[in-house]
Image (tube, rainbow, N blue to C red):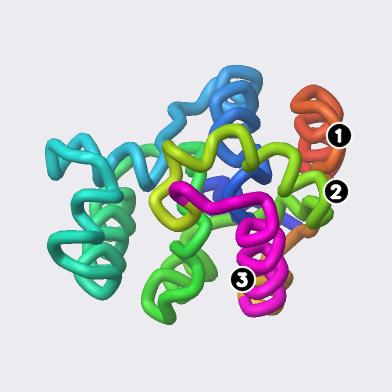
Amino acid sequence: MSLKKHLCLLGFMGAGKSTVGKELSQRLGRSWVDSDSWIEEKQGRPISEIVSEKGWPAFRAMEREFAFEMNERAPMVISCGGGFPLDDENWQWISSNCTSIYLRVDKDVLLNRLFDETAGRPLVKDMSRTELIAFIDEKLTEREPVYAKADWVIDANGTVQETIQRIQELI
């Protein structure tokens, strides 16, 4: 498979999209951008505030604006927010412009990665361990079919270096 313009990392929160994306971009000599960070910078406030004031539909519209702007950029490594590919227009953009890689992580690994950092994540803020388990189970069941449409699905349960090695073997 030949690579499309951008390399997009998809997956659930805690899958390592941002950490892997930063390191991978350096190894590939490409710029890196995280869609959520781009939106926060552009809006001058955290996603939690944006969503609480404007709602998820407005946030998804900001993600589409991000995708439109990326059309003007040189080939990059893009870490997409966990919900980014759920929007039909965003998925069309990914399909047309990106070689997509789903960083698949088991539920128990996600729980361990997310539990200590719920405060910084608007969807899981202040959740108990039991609530977080239920949330991961529900949302991952809902999102996995979309993520699995990626060009490649790789196991990202291990270290960042192992995940990057798997990606480099693919590309």
Q: Give the number of the disc on residue 139.
A: 3
Label 1 element class:
loop
Q: Residues within 10 Å of mark 1 (few under 14, many from 20)?
A: few
What residue sits right under mark 1 in the picture?
158
Would you identify the image quadrant in which residue 121 lies? top left
Cβ–Cβ under 8 Å for marks 2 and 1: yes
Q: Residues under labels 1 and 3: Cα distance? A: 22 Å
Would you identify the image quadrant in which residue 51 lies? bottom left
Residue drawn at 60 percent across, 41 percent down:
17
Q: Residues within 10 Å of mark 3 (few under 14, many from 20)?
A: few
Boundaries of the magenta span: 125-142
Residue type at mark 1: give it.
Gly
Residue type at mark 3: give it.
Lys
In which quadrant is the C terminus drawn?
A: top right
The answer to whether 65 appears left or right of 20 in the picture is: left
Q: Is residue 67 magenta?
A: no
**One can see residue 75 in this view:** no
Q: Earlier in the sequence, mark 3 or mark 2?
A: 3
